[in-house]
Image (cartoon, rainbow, N blue to C red):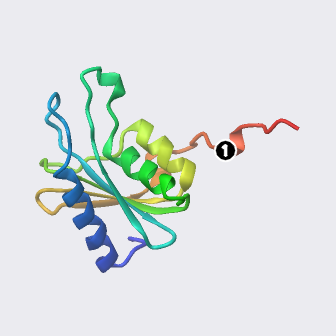
Amino acid sequence: MPLLNNETINQLKSAAIKASANAYCPYSRFVVGAAVLCESGSIYTGCNVENASLGLTVCAERNAVFGAVAQGETKIVAVAVYAPVDTVTAPCGACRQVISEFNPKAEIYMFNHKELLTQVNLQELLPMAFGPSDIENPT
């Protein structure tokens, strides 16, 4: 059962779709947009940005999370991911780990161009995540 109401889910979806229009993906041609809802109610967006040195490519989800953090937001409630493909696209492993840093229980909403929606809790996508509590702080 979705954590968010339909209006908020639709706002996230619209923001992710709008962000996908700015995707820079000349190599994969795989367009992705993401929207992050923070505890404050603010929504931050991102798109995937590829690079000829493919290892330097940054996913839409991480761009959205990093944008939120750059504005002082560190409490993520939900992330929406949009890709105009036939199936829904889940965040990659690196994105899952970054989202987990800011809420290991974040809700993830995935949309495609056919209006297909899949909703899961991040713990379903990243069980037993490595997090801040796994690092011993020096005394």
The residue at the far front in this view is: 71
Residue 119 vertical position relative to residue 128 in the rendered view, above or below: below
The residue at the far right in this view is: 139
The front one of 115 and 53 is 53
Callout 1 crowding tier (Cα within 10 Å): few <14, some 14–19, many ≥20: few
**Callout 1: SS:** helix
Instruction: Name the side, left or right, on which 48 lies relative to 115.
Output: right
User: Residue tagged by mark 1?
Assistant: 132
The quarter of the picture where residue 54 lies is top left
The residue at the far top in this view is: 53
The C terminus - image quarter: top right
Query: Where residue 93 sits: x, y (%)?
Result: 42, 37
Query: Where residue 57 sits: x, y (%)?
Result: 32, 31
The N terminus - image quarter: bottom left
Count of residue discs = 1
Q: Residue at x 18, y 43 (%)?
A: 31
Query: Where residue 127 sits: x, y (%)?
Result: 52, 45
Q: Residue at x 83, y 35 (%)?
A: 138
